[in-house]
Image (cartoon, grey):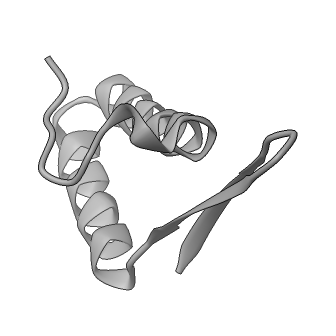
Amino acid sequence: MKRFSSYDRSMTYQIEISPTAVADVERIFLWLKEQSGDTAYRWVREYYEVMLKLAQLPTRCQPGCRPN
């Protein structure tokens, strides 16, 4: 399980990504890599950046929310 943590003055937030989600990300990455290596690396980097942002601002996106 992948975990991302961020520390605030008063609270600690931890984002946990399930093994199923990690496997999905890996599968998507491998498919994208076959199509375009640059796209695959950019996509996976952005995915993990979003996870880090959620660790900093957990109320930014509630379950089921989709970014614009």
Say above or below: 23 vs 54: below
Q: How far across and down, in percent of the image, does residue 35 sit?
A: 16, 35
Q: How far across and down, in percent of the image, does residue 44 sit?
A: 41, 41
Task: Determine the residue positioned at 48% across, 44% down.
Answer: 58
Residue nearest the viewer, comparing 10 with 56: 10
Task: Determine the residue positioned at 75% across, 52% down.
Answer: 11
Q: On the rendered image, what quadrant is the C terminus found in?
A: top left
Residue nearest the viewer, comparing 13 with 68: 13
Task: Determine the residue positioned at 53% across, 81% down.
Answer: 1
Outermost residue, front side: 10
Residue nearest the viewer, comparing 19 with 6: 6
Residue nearest the viewer, comparing 67 with 42: 67
Say above or below: 8 vs 20: above
Q: How far across and down, in percent of the image, does residue 7 sit?
A: 81, 47
Residue 9: quadrant of the picture? top right
Outermost residue, top side: 68
Task: Determine the residue positioned at 38% across, 70% down.
Answer: 22
Residue 59: quadrant of the picture? top left
| Total numbered circles | 0
